[in-house]
């Protein structure tokens, strides 16, 4: 090491070999590793290293103004009060850079250093911070990237209202707060809110108000799990679960549920399913898994229930000891109404009794044209007419006949009762013999077109009368409307009648005139005659009843006959 003085330049130099290591001047300028020719008080060629201060791991470069140390300081530390690197003025940190590279302007807060910027800061292609030529809010960046940095503690970045944070090379995604609302806009592709951990994604409103899912476009809102759609709300407000094809009727909002086996709604109590509504491919079910009731209400009042045993009660709680269907009605209503069917006669209704497996009818009660009919099997046994007449349909000369022990009668109220007297041959209960002897009474109506003086056939053999005997015959004639002269004339007489095997006259043609008595409204010279004639074999060898009038008709007149067996 050599020390020499240079009188011409007023310098003192310390050399190592031929290299100047330290140079000082009379003006107290110092040069290290270089010649003092730049007019600087300290000039260093190479690196300057600042060591920590007595083991505190803090390094500091201080600058003085007007002989006051600390007006400007550059510090760096790892453990002390100078963590991290920072610039200070008058002992107050103004700018810091963390060990991770995060940049912070320390005096920036809600009242200091705020305002509307004229230009934005950005970076050039080399990462240098530059002033952009874009006025804030008028277009895309470039913006200031803080790569590798982390803001810790309660640090925050305050952006002005209507500031837009644009993401993507084309600024396709924008995050903006307009002073009232926060917007996240994406003009390309889908927008995802993803959680790549095992935690949950929460949409939480911690103050008053609603959480809204709003599709401004006339589309659907879809809900997926395992990347498969599970539920949707369509643009009309209908909801579909398990289906993308929603079924709805005009004017209604519909919940459509679909599954491979059907759809089901489960009603739970304390997390356990108790009741269900569901369907399969063909059937619909209302299901109660508990031993309880199924109740139906209207106007907040129970109207019907099915109990756990399957008993049905309408207007009452069914008694398990009674029938499966029990009905109770208020005093102003009927107990049970049967309405006439749509097909067939509209006046018909029916109660049918089946065997246990519903394969055959045991009995039935039918209402037809105001009459009440009673069946066993499929055969009518009795009927009550609209006038109250009772008829036993199987009663005839061979079935269910015999000598009665007592007669049936009616009390003063019309109730059918057993009389206290043995039956007599003739009673005053019937208006006529015709009404009293159903097995010996017959009737027929013959459409008679008269040619004066010519007989016409009324009946033959057992066409009408099926039993042999002596009969009184009544004939009612009213032929004025078809060219006759008789108004409501009644004829009566006596005749003998036999069955189809009772004609034995081989010559044939035996005629028996029937003497008739006539009484009525008016005959006007008109006369009707009756006779019986035994026919030949070519005509059936049967007895025939024939009619003739002394007037010719222009059309057919209905003649009504009634026959009552006397003997």
Image: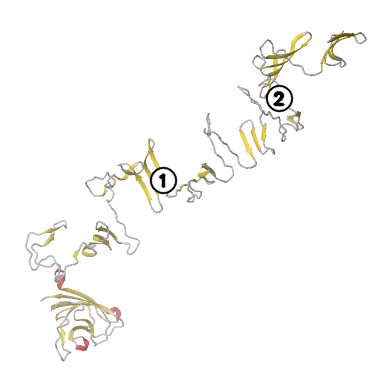
* x and y, in percent, of residue 353 in the image: 24, 58
Work out whether residue 513 or residue 126 is closer to the camera in this orientation and state it: 126
Q: Is residue 231 visible?
A: no
Examine the image and state in which quarter residue 548 appears: bottom left
Position of the C terminus by quadrant: bottom left
Q: Is residue 208 above or below residue 189?
A: above
Q: Can residue 554 be seen in this view?
A: yes
Nearest-to-viewer mark from 2 and 1: 1
Work out whether residue 290 or residue 82 is closer to the camera in this orientation and state it: 82
Most distant residue in the right direction:
8
Most distant residue in the bottom direction:
507
* x and y, in percent, of residue 530 in the image: 19, 83
Instruction: Describe the element under mark 1 as helix, strand or loop.
Output: strand
Q: Is residue 482 above or below residue 263?
A: below
- Give the total of numbered labels: 2
Examine the image and state in which quarter residue 461 appears: bottom left
* x and y, in percent, of residue 260 in the image: 44, 49
Work out whether residue 88 or residue 381 is closer to the camera in this orientation and state it: 88
The residue drawn where x is 15% and y is 77% is: 467
Q: In this view, does 396 lie above or below 527?
A: above
User: Which label sits on residue 115?
Assistant: 2
In the image: residue 168, left or right of residue 273 = right
Position of the N terminus by quadrant: top right
Q: How many neighbours does mark 2 have within 10 angstroms: few (below 14), some (14-19), or many (20 or more)?
A: few
Instruction: Describe the element under mark 2 as helix, strand or loop.
Output: loop
**Labels 2 and 1: the sequence-earlier one:** 2
Examine the image and state in which quarter residue 61 appears: top right
Identify residue for label 1: 264
User: Which label sits on residue 496?
Assistant: none
The residue drawn where x is 53% and y is 46% is: 234
């Amino acid at each position: 090491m050599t020390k020499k003085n240079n009188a011409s330049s007023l310098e003192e130099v310390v050399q190592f070999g031929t290299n100047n290591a330290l140079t000082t001047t009379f003006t107290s300028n110092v040069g290290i590793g270089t010649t003092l020719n730049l007019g600087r008080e300290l000039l260093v060629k190479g690196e300057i290293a600042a060591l920590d201060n007595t083991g505190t791991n803090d390094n500091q470069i201080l600058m003085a103004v007007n002989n006051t140390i600390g007006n400007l300081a550059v510090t760096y530390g790892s453990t002390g009060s100078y963590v991290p690197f920072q610039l200070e003025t008058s002992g107050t940190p103004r700018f810091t850079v963390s060990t991770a590279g995060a940049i912070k302007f320390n005096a920036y807060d809600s009242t200091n250093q705020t305002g509307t910027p004229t230009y934005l800061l950005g970076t050039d292609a080399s990462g240098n911070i530059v002033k952009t030529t874009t006025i804030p809010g008028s277009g895309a960046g470039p913006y200031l990237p803080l790569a590798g940095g982390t803001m810790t503690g309660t640090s925050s970045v305050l952006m002005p209202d209507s500031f837009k944070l644009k993401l993507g090379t084309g600024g396709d995604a924008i995050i903006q707060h307009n002073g009232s609302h926060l917007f996240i806009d994406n003009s390309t592709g889908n927008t995802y809110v993803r959680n790549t951990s095992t935690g949950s994604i929460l949409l939480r409103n911690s103050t008053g108000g609603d959480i809204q899912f709003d599709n401004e476009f006339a589309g659907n809102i879809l809900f997926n799990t395992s990347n498969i759609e599970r539920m949707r709300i369509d643009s009309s407000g209908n909801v579909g679960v398990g289906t993308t094809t929603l079924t709805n009727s005009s004017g209604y909002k519909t919940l459509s549920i679909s599954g491979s086996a059907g759809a089901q709604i489960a009603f739970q109590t304390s997390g356990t399913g108790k009741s269900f509504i569901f369907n399969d491919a063909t059937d619909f079910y209302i299901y109660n898994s508990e031993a309880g009731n199924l109740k139906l209400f209207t106007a907040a009042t129970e109207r019907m229930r099915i109990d756990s045993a399957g008993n049905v009660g309408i207007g009452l709680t069914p008694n398990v000891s009674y029938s499966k269907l029990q009905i109770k009605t208020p005093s102003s209503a009927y107990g049970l109404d049967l309405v006439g069917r749509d097909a067939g006669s509209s006046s018909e209704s029916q109660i049918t009794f089946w065997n246990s497996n519903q394969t055959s009818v045991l009995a039935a009660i039918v209402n037809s044209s105001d009459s009440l009919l009673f069946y066993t099997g499929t055969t009518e046994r009795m009927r009550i007419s609209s006038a109250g007449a009772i008829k036993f349909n199987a009663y005839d000369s061979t079935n269910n006949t015999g000598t009665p022990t007592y007669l049936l009668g009616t009390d003063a109220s019309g109730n059918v009762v057993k009389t206290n007297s043995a039956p007599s041959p003739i009673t005053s209960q019937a208006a006529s013999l015709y009404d009293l002897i159903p097995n010996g009474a017959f009737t027929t109506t013959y459409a008679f077109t008269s040619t004066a003086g010519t007989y016409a056939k009324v009946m033959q053999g057992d066409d009408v009368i099926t039993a042999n005997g002596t009969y009184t015959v009544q004939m009612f004639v009213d032929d004025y409307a078809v060219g006759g002269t008789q108004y409501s004339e009644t004829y009566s007489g006596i005749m003998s009648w036999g069955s189809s095997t009772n004609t034995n006259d081989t010559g044939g043609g035996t005629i028996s005139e029937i003497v008739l008595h006539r009484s009525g409204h008016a005959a006007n010279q008109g006369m009707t005659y009756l006779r019986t004639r035994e026919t030949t074999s070519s005509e059936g060898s049967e007895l025939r009843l024939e009619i003739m009038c002394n007037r010719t008709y222009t059309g057919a007149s209905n003649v009504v006959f009634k026959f009552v067996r006397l003997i």
